[in-house]
Amino acid sequence: MNKYGQDIPLTKEQIEIRGYKRRNLVLVIIIIILIAIIGIQIGVMLTR
């Protein structure tokens, strides 16, 4: 089998998969930061 023939469809799919993974990572990081901020605010409110 020719590598070039297989790589053309695979690269398009891989780029899409990588794009979704990057978007998911960004969303997970944003959610973790929001949870951390809310947790700190709750801790401050409880200590006060």
Image: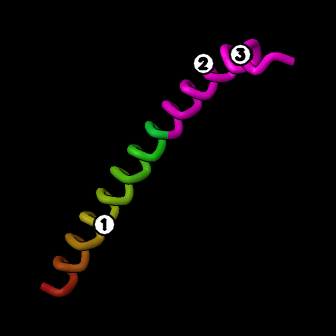
Alpha carbons under labels 3 and 1: distance apart: 47 Å
Dot in front, 1 or 2: 2
User: Looking at the image, is mark 1 or mark 2 earlier in the sequence?
Assistant: 2
User: Looking at the image, is mark 3 or mark 2 earlier in the sequence?
Assistant: 3
Dot in front, 3 or 1: 3
Picture mark count: 3
Magenta extent: 1-21
Q: Which residue is drawn at 66% across and 14% down?
A: 8
* Helix, strand or loop for the magenta stretch, by majority: helix
Alpha carbons under labels 3 and 2: distance apart: 13 Å
Of the residues shown, which amino acid type is indicated by label 3?
A: Tyr
Give the labeled residue for mark 1: 36
Mark sitting on residue 1: none
Q: In this view, does 2 lie to the left or right of 8?
A: right
Q: Residue at x 62, y 22 (%)?
A: 11
Alpha carbons under labels 1 and 2: distance apart: 36 Å
Residue 35 lies in quadrant: bottom left
Q: Which colour scheme is used?
A: rainbow
Of the residues shown, which amino acid type is indicated by label 1?
A: Ala
In magenta segment, residue 6: yes
* Element carrying mark 2: helix
* Element carrying mark 1: helix
Give the labeled residue for mark 2: 12
Binning the other alpha carbons within 10 Å of mark 1 as few (below 14), some (14 to 19) or many (20 upward) gives few
